[in-house]
Image: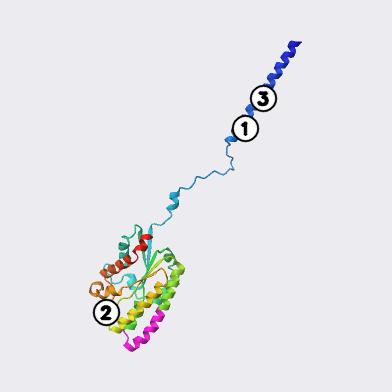
Amino acid sequence: MLKKSMWYSILTIACVGFIVLAMGFYEAIIVTTAVNPQPSANAPLTQPPEDSTKLSSKTTNSFKVLILGDSIAKGTGDEKNKGFSGYLPEYFKNNTLKEILVDDAGIDGLESIGLLEQLQTRRLDKTIKDSDMILVSIGGNDVRSILSLNDLAKEDQFKVRLDSYLGNLKQTMKVLRSTNPNTIVIFLGLYNPYEKASNVADISLLNEWNYNTQQVVEEDGKGFFIPTYDLLKFNLGRYIAKDGLHPNSAGYQALSNRISKSVEAIITKS
């Protein structure tokens, strides 16, 4: 009887031990799967961080120039058919490793009111917005018609034409700035291709015209007035085309060189 009780006890202990062992094994499985859970079908996948070099590659590697204005802006007179659009990239490349891209919207015979109307059509807005620099040549056709008048009529008409021109110029700068607040605006002053045949009064009027233009341009803050009068005055034979009015190839190169040197620091930083 004692032996039978002993066997019952041993069997009971064995069963309890088996149950405890099984429970421990089950808990071990639960812990293991909790440490390394398998993602569910709805769980979001973790995205790797973006490569920082890709973010920096968004910066542009070009310097865009827009040329606006009259026949000088267009490059008329250059026997090589290059003008500013051809020579400026050659001079600018000495100051930057960026690719120089030029859009030339110059029009022969354009006056200041014509330039303003061209901008007010808004057809050039996209080009203006993309431009790092805008070169403007305007006013020569406004003042040329005055210089052919007799002295008395010339003085009367000068102030009328100057006031009208300055009003157009202010509106032009306003349109450019509203479209692109950051672009550099380079404005070419006027020269006198008839220097040898001009009287003192004509030269005085041209100087006054340039002075007033410079005041308006430099009030902008990011506008630069580039004088041309002195550069061409003593080099009419070298820099004026056969038409006696526009720069020739050498003249455009000389002017492009002056523009490049005037904005060298700005382009280098761009």
Task: Give x and y (percent) for residue 269.
Answer: 38, 60
Query: Quick one: label 1 or label 2, which is nearer the N terminus?
Result: 1
Query: Quick one: label 3 or label 2, which is nearer the N terminus?
Result: 3
Q: Which residue is denoted by mark 3 in the rendering? A: 20
Disc 1/disc 3 C-alpha distance (Å) = 16 Å
* CB under 8 Å between discs 1 and 2: no
Q: Does the magenta segment cover residue 249?
A: no
The amino acid sitting under disc 3 is Val
Q: Pointer 1: residues within 10 angstroms few (<14), some, or many (20+)? A: few
Q: Which residue is denoted by mark 2 in the rendering? A: 195
Task: Give x and y (percent) for residue 137.
Answer: 35, 72
Answer with the quarter of the image where residue 208 lies.
bottom left
Task: Give x and y (percent) for residue 190.
Answer: 33, 75
Disc 2 element:
helix
Disc 1 element:
helix
Query: Quick one: label 1 or label 3, which is nearer the N terminus?
Result: 3
Q: How is the image coloured?
A: rainbow
* CB under 8 Å between discs 1 and 3: no
The amino acid sitting under disc 2 is Glu
Query: Which range of residues does the magenta coloring cover?
Result: 148-165
Is 126 in front, or is 265?
Answer: 265
